[in-house]
Image: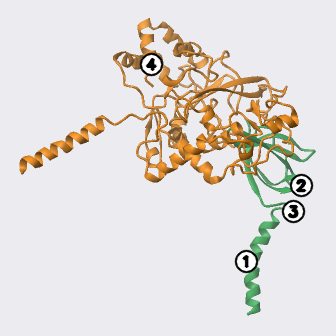
Chain colours: A orange, B green
Amino acid sequence: MMRRVAAGGIWLLVAALGGAACRRPAQPGDPLPGLSAAERQRFDRGRAIFDSVFTPATGLGPLFNADACAECHEDPVSGGTGDEVERHATAFHPEATGRPCDELVALGGPVFQKRVTPALQAALAIDSEPVPPQVTAIAARTTPDIFGFGLLDAVPDSEILAYADPDDRDSDGISGRPNRFFDGRLGRFGRKALVPALREFNDGALAAEQGITTPAVPEEETVGGRPIPAGVDPAPDPELSAAATDLLDAFVRLLAPPSPARLSGQARQGRAAFATVGCDRCHVPALHTGDSPIPALRHRAVDAYTDLLLHDMGPELADICLGQATPSEFRTEPLMGVRRMARFLHDGRATTLEQAIELHAGEAARSRDRFRALPAEERAALVAFLKTL
Amino acid sequence: MTRSLLVSLFIIAAPIAAATAQQPGGGPAHNVQGAVRTVNVRGRALEVTTGVGMALRVVRLQVPAPLSLTGLRPGDLVRVSYGARPGGYVAYTIERLERTP
């Protein structure tokens, strides 16, 4: 009897340890671990909306870039990256009194949609939203994956601001400053960190990318500043209900971050080089979430490799201004999931990680130069490390 | 009985009437917090940039006297309550929260 009980206990212990050791790493598109049944259900229902293909009759357009969230965020699954490239444009006037950046909102900016519905095409004889002559720069924007964005949303402002050093008081050549939305709140989403919150990022994307009105954005944007002609937008506003946008938000919010690959010996060496070179001064390895009504997002470390701050990247990469971001300032791109990307930097101009590093300048010039000075073996190790993220 | 009912109605109605009086001739108040885009002191007009995510919008407002536009300049962070009139939006209150650098 005792022997049977002991054997049973050992079996349970082995099963428990084995279960922990063999826990399947999160795959792209998986939900965060530890969701309640209700949260999981909302995640699944939200994914169906994310995958929904809209038509003009169901609210698409009349200006749009894609007919579904998953048209762009598709690779390797919904929520991933994609090969679509958007067009953003603004005007930067550094000598101006007040704000030097004009997002050209009154002229349809800063997102100038590349597609129009047949009805708008027929009414105005245009194939895309016209870019006004006032622009000083037009930017290409690739599609980022959005895995783990719920965790980034849950990082307190105070943690981000703790990394800011706008006057470079520590004299390391790296400043880092926050962008702020028009209402003064700290920004964190988007290549220029303009958008303060994930919910707004999602609601704004429905409007700006698909032309879908919601309770948060109940009116269509203008066409280059002109009202939309009567009769070309048949769906009644809001074109997506509050309940549907809530579910969509749940899907995006609860997407798990990419699981890093196992570190080889070479990658371990590269991780050390990543710190030695100083990449980690901006690509901060881990941020920490604060309180959240969702336990799976509460008090978690997120291996995002970003500080969510703006840094000057030099004139070669400069394109548009946005909010308080100057043309050469970009938010530190999160490196989580970078191994699955085919193109790098905000406009996809780099096709390899080495190229992307080489194109770093401005505040990153010192780290780039240290990378260049590394022996070939260590440079390869650093890249091997990046390919585990 | 009738008198007490009237008194009760007055007690309920008086604050509502007072609140309505704070919105001169316009619809119910909306609020926006954003950056001043343009100020037209002579034309008594104000434009505020706001939005949701990357869906940015400009709110165009008429600013009746005695609200003051003096001292406002592009880039200032403001909070505005406003309402709709047939001719467009009309500001009820304007509060400058932060001066542009």
Q: Nearer the viewer, mark 2 or mark 3?
A: 3
Dot 2: few (<14), some (14–19), or many (≥20) neighbours within 10 Å? Answer: few
Disc 2 marks a residue whose amino acid type is Ala
Q: Chain of mark 1?
A: B
SS assignment at label 3: loop
Q: Pointer 3 indicates a residue of which chain?
A: B
Tell me the residue that label 4 is attached to.
Answer: A274
Q: Output the chain of dot 2.
A: B
Q: Are marks 1 and 4 on the same chain?
A: no
Label 1 – label 2 distance at C-alpha? 30 Å
- Taking depth in this image into account, of A130 and A279 the one nearest to the observer is A130
Rate crowding at label 3 as few (under 14), some (14 to 19) or many (20 or more) other CA atoms within 10 Å.
Answer: few
The residue under label 2 is B65
A118 relative to A164 in the view: left or right: right
Residue type at tag 3? Gly
Dividing the picture into quarters, in which one does residue A330 lie? top right
* Dot 4 and dot 3 residues touching (CB under 8 Å): no
Q: Are marks 1 and 2 in contact (CB under 8 Å)?
A: no
First in sequence: mark 3 or mark 1? 1
The correct choice, above or below, for B96 with respect to B21 in the image is: above
Tally the numbered discs. 4
Q: Which structural element holds mark 1?
A: helix
Residue flagged by tag 4: what amino acid is it?
A: Phe
User: Quick one: quadrant of the C terminus of chain A?
Assistant: top left
Which residue position holds label 3? B25
Q: Label for residue B12?
A: 1
The label nearer to you, 1 versus 2, is 1
Q: What is the C-alpha distance between the residues marked 1 and 4?
A: 68 Å
> Where is residue A374 shown, x and y percent of the image?
45, 8
